Image: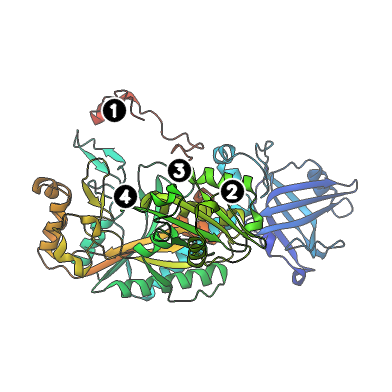
């Protein structure tokens, strides 16, 4: 192998243009492809900025030409040559107006035939991509994703620092905290039998930073949650974590809207319009069947329970009692887009969310087409059409069941319909604040309450004196989520700063004094010495970058992600520990039937 001794890269491959014609340049990168035309060898060389075409000509340098004949895919090379106007221009290539006539070639590293092609449209399995991630990351699309991620973090640091936020690191080896998922535990060798937890968020530390008087904190930080994975989840993920003192909801919201405006201008050159729309949790669930509604399209949910309470269709009339309802969506102007077979497939989709069926009506030029039309009077039909704002060409879809099943299943049908109709435009960005979330969640089996956000979230001011009510599902939190195109990209809350209110929260959650002291004692101790009103928010960086780069999976914007089984195919982590390590930690492995 040759070296770069005596050479210095003068330019990146993708930066050359017609303004460089006549210049001698030195390029370094990977061989993308090679074509041998006899007396000429054409080589595309690639680096992080793009591709340049290199021509090796026997009349210019026989030595370079002979080396070029032996080049293979993904060889690492250095080329010295003169930029020339390209004879056959390529308008689809950034450097398509020029080529480099090589006078010198050095082969810096040879490559075996790669197990995956280095091109964006390579249709290879994700398992293979993750196993050879260092090759996958050579693809222009993947490099662009990571460079966009850097633009997001750079914009974040610049914006928040300019507003007086201080970037402060918090510990990774901590006590377990209640964040809604299982902790990753780390055994202590020095203190055998005891464990650290990896943080699900820096929640308690950032609150203590407010007690310390730091006023405004932020951190771009790794967090860890041992939970079932999906396309927008990873066991280790990154948050843009913020906390502010002496603020209320509007202060946090306006500050974070400004941050998002800066990020979208920096990454996509889009002028996001602020302030964003706001919607209460109850309205989001009632109208969209989701606490993170996608607002790029309509199809809002309408309640027709009062209209069908005495109709002849028992499926509907029996579902108008307390706790149940009949609701529908209007797929406006798209009745002709769905055949009966396709509507049946929508029904199957609704059934995966526990709906027992999906009733429908098509409004056509010849009248209403529906298998349930005969069960309704003319007055009932007229009232349904009016409530649903139905016109010719519309398709009405209905579900009757418990409120929870109806809202969830219709919310999912709404998304499925929009997806099939191609209405989820990735070039459109619809932001929404969802506010006034429930303060507590109730376990359906045990009846016990847990904190919907975390136990330090403040109740709404008008609900503080109602914490002792029997039905605690009616209590609301000073919590807020920022939603983008149906994804929650961030969330936060006003924190409790009153010790009496905090104690009431612990009482509702059934936490004993001993348990409170064990898990939160250090925070409560800090609160004895003067705590400012404070609030915060954390963005999911991975999910935000996923949406900005128009990807469908956060693994596309993380350099070395885990797969669906929380395994790293590249390094084979996690692996079994050596016996000596386990002995040092005082740990004995016992096989479990738990999955």
Element class at badge 2: helix
Instruction: Write the residue at 23% across / 28% down.
Output: 586
Q: Quadrant of the C terminus?
A: top left
Is disc 1 surrounded by few (<14), some (14 to 19) or many (20+) residues within 10 Å? some
Q: Tell me the quadrant of the picture where the N terminus can be found.
A: top right
Task: Give the residue pinned by disc 1.
Answer: 582
**Can you say whether 457 is above or below 123 in the image?**
below
4 and 2 marks in contact (CB < 8 Å): no
Give the residue at mark 2. Answer: 343
Q: Nearer the viewer, residue 288 or 191?
A: 288
Residue at 42 percent across and 58 percent down: it is 488
Residue beneath disc 4: 200
Local crowd at mark 3 within 10 Å, few (<14), some, or many (≥20)?
A: some
Q: How far apart in space, not on screen, are marks 1 and 2 (Cα)?
A: 57 Å
Neighbours of disc 4 within 10 Å: few (<14), some (14-19), many (20+) = many
Mark 1 or 2, nearer chain start: 2
- Kindly report which numbered mark, 1 or 2, lies closer to the viewer in this rendering: 2
Q: CA distance from mark 1 to mark 3?
A: 52 Å
């Amino acid at each position: 192998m040759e070296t770069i001794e005596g050479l210095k890269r003068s330019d990146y491959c993708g930066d050359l243009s017609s303004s460089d014609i006549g210049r001698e340049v030195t390029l370094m990168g990977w061989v993308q492809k090679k074509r041998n035309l006899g007396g000429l060898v054409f080589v595309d060389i690639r680096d992080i900025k793009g591709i340049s075409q290199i021509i090796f000509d026997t009349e210019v340098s026989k030595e370079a030409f002979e080396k070029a004949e032996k080049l293979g895919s993904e060889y690492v090379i250095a080329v010295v040559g003169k930029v020339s106007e390209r004879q056959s221009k390529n308008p689809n290539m950034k450097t398509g107006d020029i080529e480099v006539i090589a006078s010198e070639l050095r082969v810096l590293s040879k490559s075996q035939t790669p197990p995956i092609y280095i091109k964006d449209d390579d249709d290879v399995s994700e398992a293979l991509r993750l196993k050879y991630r260092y090759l996958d990351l050579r693809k222009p699309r993947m490099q662009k994703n990571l460079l966009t991620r850097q633009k997001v973090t750079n914009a974040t640091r610049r914006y928040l620092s300019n507003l007086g936020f201080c970037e402060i690191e918090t510990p990774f080896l901590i006590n377990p905290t209640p964040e809604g998922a299982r902790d990753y535990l780390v055994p202590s060798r020095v203190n055998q039998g005891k464990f650290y937890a990896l943080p699900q968020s820096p929640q308690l530390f950032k609150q203590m930073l407010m007690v310390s008087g730091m006023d405004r904190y932020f951190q771009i930080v790794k967090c860890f949650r041992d939970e079932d994975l999906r396309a927008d989840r990873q066991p280790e993920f990154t948050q843009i974590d913020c906390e502010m003192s002496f603020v209320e909801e509007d202060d946090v919201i306006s500050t974070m809207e400004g941050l998002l405006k800066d990020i979208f201008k920096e990454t996509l050159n889009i002028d996001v319009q602020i302030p964003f729309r706001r919607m209460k949790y109850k309205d989001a669930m009632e109208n969209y069947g989701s606490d993170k509604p996608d607002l790029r399209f309509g199809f809002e949910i309408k309640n027709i329970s009062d209209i069908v309470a005495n109709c002849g269709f028992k499926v509907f009339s029996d579902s108008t009692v307390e706790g149940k309802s009949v609701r529908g969506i209007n797929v406006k102007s798209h009745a002709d887009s769905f055949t009966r077979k396709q509507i049946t497939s929508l029904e199957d989709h609704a059934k995966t969310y526990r709906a027992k069926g999906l009733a429908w009506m098509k409004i056509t030029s010849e009248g209403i087409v529906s298998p349930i039309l005969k069960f309704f009077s003319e007055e009932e039909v007229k009232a349904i059409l009016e409530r649903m704002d139905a016109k010719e060409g519309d398709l009405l879809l209905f579900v009757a069941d418990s409120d929870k099943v109806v809202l969830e299943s219709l919310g999912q049908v709404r998304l499925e319909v929009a997806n099939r109709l191609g209405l989820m435009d990735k070039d459109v960005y619809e932001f929404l604040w969802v506010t006034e979330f429930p303060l507590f969640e109730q376990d359906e089996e045990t009846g016990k309450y847990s904190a919907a956000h975390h136990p330090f979230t403040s109740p709404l001011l008008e609900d503080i004196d109602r914490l002792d009510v029997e039905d605690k599902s009616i209590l609301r939190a000073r919590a807020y989520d920022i939603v983008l195109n149906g994804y929650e990209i961030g969330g936060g809350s006003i924190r409790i700063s009153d010790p009496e209110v905090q104690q009431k929260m612990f009482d509702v959650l059934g936490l004993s004094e001993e348990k409170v002291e064990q898990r939160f004692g250090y925070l409560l101790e800090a609160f004895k010495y003067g705590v400012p009103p404070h609030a915060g928010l954390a963005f999911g960086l991975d999910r935000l970058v996923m949406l900005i780069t128009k990807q469908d999976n956060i693994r596309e914007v993380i350099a070395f992600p885990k797969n669906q089984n929380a395994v790293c195919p590249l390094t084979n982590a996690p692996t079994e520990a050596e016996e000596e390590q386990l002995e040092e930690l005082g740990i004995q492995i016992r096989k479990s039937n738990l999955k």
